[in-house]
Every structure is written in C-alpha cells, then in structure tokens.
Image (spheres, helix red, strand yellow):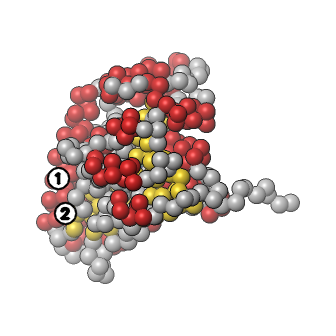
C-alpha cells in the first residue's frame, strides 16, 4: 500500500522547530530562545483566564468582536479592518495561501523570519530572498528582486533574528517602488518594543491603499505566546479575503479573553516595555565589554556575534550555556553560524546569561 501523496512542494518544507524549553538532567532551565515576554503575562489576563474555565464548553465569538473593538478604539482603526488569528503565524500563512500559489514568488529579506519561506512553500509558491545590508532589510535589494511573478513581499519590522528595523520613510519607499498588485505584508510582531521616532508599524500604508497589511501579535510584549493570538490590520478587501479563508472559530475563547485583559492592562504593558529597554541596553553593554559584537536591537532580543575561534565560537558558547541550564537560539539555521540570539529575560535570567558568558569567555569553562 502506498501513502497518499501531498501536493508538490509540501515535502520540501522543513518543519519549524521552536525553541526548546527543557534540557536533559537540568531541573531549572533559563529559556531565552523564543523572544517571549520577560515579565510574563498581565495578572489580569491570568485572572480572566481562570474565570473562563466554567464556560469552555461554549464556542468562542468567531468574530472576536470585543477584542477587535478594543484594538480599533485604541488606535483609531475601523474594527472591520481587523482580523484576529491563532497567533500572527496563522495570519501570515493565510495571506500566503490566499494571494500566492504555484508559479508565484514570495519575497523576503535574507535573514527574515523562517515562517515566510514555509508559508510560501505550503502555498506552492517559490520563496525568494534579497540580500541585506548590515543585517538590515535593503529596500533597493528587495525592489531589484521583484519579478512579474512576485505576489507578496514579507517584511519583518523590526526583524527577527537581527533586531534591526527600517525607518518609516524606507518602508514607504519600498511600498512606492512595488507594483500595485504586489501585497506588502509588514510583520510588526516586535513593534511595541520600539521607541525610535522614525519607526512606524506601517498603519499609514494600510490606510493609503489596498495592498499593505500589518500583522501584530500578543505573543511578545503581551507575553501570551501559549494562547496563540495575533491580529492583522488590513484594507477592507484584504480583511474580506482573510475572513473567507480563516476557520470560523480560529481564535480560542481563552486567547480572546486573556488577550483583551492584557490589552487593557496598560500598566503591565508599560512595565514590560521599560524593563525591556533597561535590560536590553544593560545586556548589550555587558556583552560588548566582554568583547562580543552585539547588533543594535530595537526588539526584545539581541543578535550576538562570537569570534571565529575554536573553543570561543558561537557553537561552543551555546554548548556551554546549555551545560549551565541556559537555552538561547543558535543561528546556524538562519545562515548566521557565528551568532546566537538571546532573548531579554527577567533581571535574574539576564544577569545569569551575562555571567555565564563571562565565565565562558574567560576560559574557566
Ligand atoms: N513574526 C515574527 C517576526 C516572529 O518572530 C514571530 C514569533 N517568533 C512571529 C511572527 C509569530 O508570532 P505568533 O506567536 O504571533 O505566531
């Protein structure tokens, strides 16, 4: 008997492997590998979640009405232009399935988020990468890579795993240089962490035309990664398409209720943002003092280059951190074998990773 064959291209997809959360033989692991919220979720989100328990036999509100209304009110958006998803991953994938297929190309910058190429392949489209300049997306290179077959450009802004960003004017230049029929998907998963004045998540581009979408998530600053909740701000025509292709109850009641409580807890949000700013700069300074090269980051993680020197390189550092119960993200699968990506954790976790790397580099390993 032979197994049913999936569509062509599906077997070229390498499954996405998330950051591990356990290490053999280590009882208390410090996990700094998935850019999760350092302070954990809002206590109000946890309370809302606990209160939901007796109601979980009910289907969720498939229209995510209350959450969309809250987001719309805060940002001055029309609620009809917001579509919620089971994590922004779902929305990023649905956009690809709806707008790109066999024979089409899906463009991203060199070290963009791994899910874009997976989404392209699952849709039967071809992922294409444009070279970066200084580990930052290059508008010129992206525009030069556009062909008549390009259907979607994914831009993570800020970018994961580099932590770099494109200023608002550059993103506008990218949009202006793309043919109108090309969909620009701005993945602003880390936007809440950015304080730079020349940054925008891209909402003005959504409002200026029919061909730009911004995706956001509750997994990062709101620290609700386990519940899977994201949203897209879209032109009307794209919201209509997403509502046709998404599942009727794609977002769980737990995600909706905790997401709304987290969104309304502006104090916890402010604490998470200032914590990240303070500890990101503390860790960057500390690692720089240790002689490592830290890519300037506006997100909740740092990309750190290690010397190309046996015993002191990124792979050895990763192994040493693991022996000491600390999991960070090795970057070889992103084409950055000399680098590790380290999430900003809570104070204790962030100090622990710096101290452990100091010991490693001092050769006392
Ligand atoms: N976009 C980027 C750039 C990310 O780094 C991530 C998570 N690692 C996501 C999207 C997906 O987030 P979510 O949990 O909302 O699916």
User: Can residue 152 be seen?
Assistant: yes
Q: Is residue 247 or residue 139 the one in the foreground?
A: 139
Q: Is residue 5 or residue 144 the one in the foreground?
A: 144
Residue located 50% across and 50% down the image? 182
Q: Position of residue 6 (x, y in %)?
A: 72, 56
**The residue carrying mark 1 has its beta carbon less than 8 Å from ligand 1:** no
Q: For residue 51, which quarter of the picture?
A: top left
Q: Position of residue 113 (x, y in %)?
A: 43, 55
- Closer to viewer: mark 2 or mark 1: 1
Q: Which residue is mark 1?
A: 281
Instruction: First in sequence, mark 2 or 1: give its number.
Output: 1
Q: In this rendering, is residue 252 above or below 280? A: above
Q: How would you rate the neighbour count of disc 2 (Cα within 10 Å): few for under 14, some for 14-19, many for 20 or more? A: many
Question: Horizontal placement of 192 versus 102: left or right?
Answer: left
| On-image quarter of the C terminus | bottom left
Question: Horizontal placement of 89 versus 283: left or right?
Answer: right
Q: In this rendering, is residue 130 above or below 85? A: below
Q: Position of residue 210 (x, y in %)?
A: 47, 38
Tally the marks.
2
Q: Is residue 344 or residue 211 the one in the foreground?
A: 211
Q: Position of residue 359 (x, y in %)?
A: 20, 68
Question: Horizontal placement of 47 versus 89: left or right?
Answer: left
Residue located 19% across and 49% down the image? 279
Give the residue at the far bottom of this rendering. Answer: 310
Residue located 37% across and 53% down the image? 174
Q: Give the number of the disc on residue 287.
A: 2
């Amino acid at each position: 008997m032979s197994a049913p064959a999936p569509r062509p291209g599906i077997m070229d997809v390498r499954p996405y492997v998330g950051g591990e959360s356990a290490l053999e033989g280590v009882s208390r692991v410090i996990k700094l590998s998935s850019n999760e919220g350092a302070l954990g979720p809002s206590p109000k989100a946890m309370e809302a979640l606990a209160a939901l328990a007796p109601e979980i036999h009910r289907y969720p509100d498939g229209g995510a009405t209350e959450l969309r209304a809250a987001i719309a009110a805060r940002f001055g958006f029309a609620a009809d232009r917001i579509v919620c998803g089971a994590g922004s991953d779902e929305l990023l994938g649905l956009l690809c399935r709806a707008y790109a297929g066999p024979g089409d190309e899906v463009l991203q910058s060199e070290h963009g988020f791994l899910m874009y190429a997976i989404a392209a392949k699952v849709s039967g489209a071809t992922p294409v990468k444009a070279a970066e300049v200084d580990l930052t997306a290059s508008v010129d290179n992206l525009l030069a890579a556009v062909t008549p077959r390009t259907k979607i450009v994914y831009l993570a802004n800020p970018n994961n795993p580099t932590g770099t960003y494109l200023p608002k004017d550059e993103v506008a230049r990218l949009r202006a240089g793309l043919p109108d029929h090309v969909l620009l998907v701005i993945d602003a998963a880390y936007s809440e962490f950015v304080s730079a004045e020349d940054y925008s998540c891209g909402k003005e581009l959504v409002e200026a035309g029919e061909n730009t979408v911004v995706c956001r998530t509750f997994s990062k600053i709101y620290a609700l990664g386990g519940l899977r909740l994201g949203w897209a701000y879209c032109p009307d025509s794209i919201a209509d398409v997403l509502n046709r292709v998404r599942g009727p109850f794609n977002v769980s009641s737990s995600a909706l209720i905790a997401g709304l409580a987290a969104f309304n807890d502006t104090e916890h949000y402010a604490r998470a943002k200032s914590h990240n700013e303070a500890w990101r700069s503390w860790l960057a300074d500390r690692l720089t003092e240790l002689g490592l090269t830290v890519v300037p980051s506006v997100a909740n993680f740092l990309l750190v280059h290690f010397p190309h020197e046996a015993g002191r390189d990124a792979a050895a550092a990763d192994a040493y951190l693991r022996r000491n119960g600390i999991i960070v993200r090795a970057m070889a699968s992103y084409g950055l074998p000399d680098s590790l990506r380290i999430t900003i954790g809570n104070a204790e976790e962030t100090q622990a990773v710096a101290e452990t790397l100091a010991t490693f580099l001092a050769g006392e390993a």
